[in-house]
């Protein structure tokens, strides 16, 4: 019965996606299809001015049905309705040459019956950018966010009582990019610290310091051939013990690829290479793997675009028996303008998580669909749905999940 329900839901999503392919008229502001959304004065809101500050507040209010709140195996599912309110605030000072942005959000989630899943999350970031000339930009950002782990994540908590895992994230980055003439230079450094709130999750606390440098040479019009080198150092808070190895490790590697700039049809980058995982503890094995970093947007015409994203590389793991983890993620998403105030997004997503040393691979995949109607310049209405299925050698980690939501987005 559940198999039949799953295919009915998938078929329904496919039908919505087909309807979304119908073309229409001029562009407008949209949250789900920004590549095909333009600047329509009918739906444009000027920021609130207060001296040099430009302020843009907004509120999202959603109701979501989830048929498997805990992402549990077949026969143990619990469904519920979730109510979400998310206020956001943006403050900007400056112009294109020198600009400072402050962004903040809060998200308050309440379940109808399964109240142990309730969560409050929030965050803020401060960023600045300096562009002395066209094609040259220096940017920096620092921020904090308290996040709630999604139950469908590869290593999410799988017990009901404590509720979703809460994690504090601190981050800071600095980036310099220059493109123009024959050469492209793009250099970035980042520090990221993750701190799980619960003391029982102390093994998840770590800091990552990483850097990336890309050098490109223009080979044709907007196309650069690129060479990228990257390195990341992971430092876990908990020290090694007699039974538990030190999980501190360095990952480094390189990729060759293409970068597309100033193109009306193709934007983004694609790179393929290798990564090397070097653990600090001799009890863990080093390894080499395929590295992929791709994000390419294809603008088919003024009303239709396709975005292809791909990633493969080393990520942190906390699962018992796993020495390391390699994730492979791929998605293809279409953005469509159906009318000047009606937009659609449809996509397919896939993720493979390989837990090195445990012999376990997990695959999660499924379609997504979203529709957005701009009622007026202050109000947007969104409908979204997704189907996800995970397969694993560990039957306790498998699940099927269907979620659908309605959202009112209020802009001021």
Image (cartoon, rainbow, N blue to C red):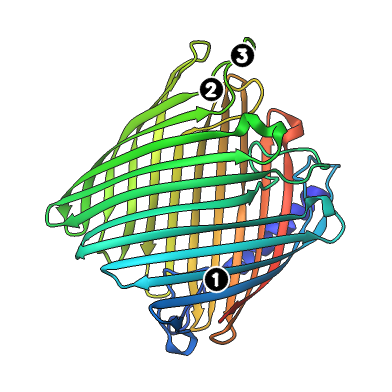
Q: Which residue is mark 3?
A: 241
Which-is-in-front pick, marks 1 and 3?
Answer: 3
Does dot 2 land on a helix, a strand or a loop?
loop
**What is the CA distance from the residue labelled 1 to the residue labelled 3?**
52 Å
Does dot 1 land on a helix, a strand or a loop?
strand
Is residue 88 shown above or below 341?
above
Residue 344: mark in rendering: 1
Is residue 149 shown above or below 58?
above
The image position of residue 154, as x and y in percent, is 63, 38
The image position of residue 54, as x and y in percent, is 43, 77
- Asked if labels 2 and 1 touch by Cβ distance under 8 angstroms, the answer is no
**What is the CA distance from the residue labelled 3 to the residue labelled 2?**
11 Å
- Asked if labels 3 and 1 touch by Cβ distance under 8 angstroms, the answer is no
Which-is-in-front pick, marks 3 and 2?
Answer: 3
Is residue 144 or residue 364 the one in the foreground?
A: 144
Residue 247: mark in rendering: 2
């Amino acid at each position: 019965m559940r198999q039949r329900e799953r295919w009915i839901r998938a078929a329904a999503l496919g039908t919505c996606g087909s309807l979304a392919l119908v073309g229409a008229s001029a562009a407008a502001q949209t949250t789900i299809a920004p590549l095909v959304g333009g600047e329509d004065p009918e739906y444009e809101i000027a920021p609130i001015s207060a001296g040099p500050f430009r302020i843009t507040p907004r509120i999202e209010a959603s109701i979501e049905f989830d048929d498997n709140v805990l992402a549990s195996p077949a026969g143990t599912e619990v469904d519920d309705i979730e109510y979400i309110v998310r206020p956001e605030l943006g403050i900007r000072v400056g112009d294109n040459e020198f600009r400072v942005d402050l962004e903040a959000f809060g998200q308050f989630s309440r379940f109808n019956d399964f109240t142990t899943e309730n969560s409050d999350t929030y965050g803020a970031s401060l960023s600045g950018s300096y562009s002395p000339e066209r094609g040259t930009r220096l940017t920096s950002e620092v921020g904090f966010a308290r996040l709630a782990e999604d139950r469908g994540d590869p290593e999410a908590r799988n017990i009901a009582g404590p509720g979703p895992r809460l994690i504090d994230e601190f981050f800071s980055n600095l980036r310099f990019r220059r493109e123009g003439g024959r050469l492209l230079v793009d250099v970035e450094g980042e520090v990221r610290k993750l701190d799980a709130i619960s003391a029982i999750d102390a093994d998840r606390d770590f800091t990552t310091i990483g850097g990336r440098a890309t050098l490109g040479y223009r080979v044709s019009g907007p196309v650069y051939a690129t060479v990228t080198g990257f390195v990341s150092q992971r430092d876990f808070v908990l020290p090694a013990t007699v039974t538990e190895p030190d999980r501190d490790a360095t990952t480094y590697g390189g990729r060759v690829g293409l970068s597309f700039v100033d193109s009306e049809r193709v934007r983004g980058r694609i790179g393929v290479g290798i990564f090397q995982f070097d653990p600090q503890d001799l009890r863990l094995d080093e390894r080499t793997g395929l590295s992929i970093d791709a994000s390419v947007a294809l603008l088919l015409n003024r009303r239709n675009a396709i975005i292809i994203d791909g990633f493969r590389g080393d990520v942190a793991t906390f699962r018992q028996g796993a020495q390391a983890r390699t994730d492979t993620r791929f998605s293809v998403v279409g953005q469509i303008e159906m009318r000047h105030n009606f937009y659609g997004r449809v996509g397919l997503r896939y993720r493979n998580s390989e837990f090195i040393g445990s012999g376990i691979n997990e695959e999660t995949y499924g379609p997504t669909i979203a529709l957005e109607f701009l009622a007026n310049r202050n109000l947007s209405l969104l409908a979204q749905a997704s189907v996800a299925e995970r397969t694993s050698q560990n039957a306790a980690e498998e699940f099927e999940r269907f979620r659908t939501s309605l959202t009112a987005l209020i802009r001021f």
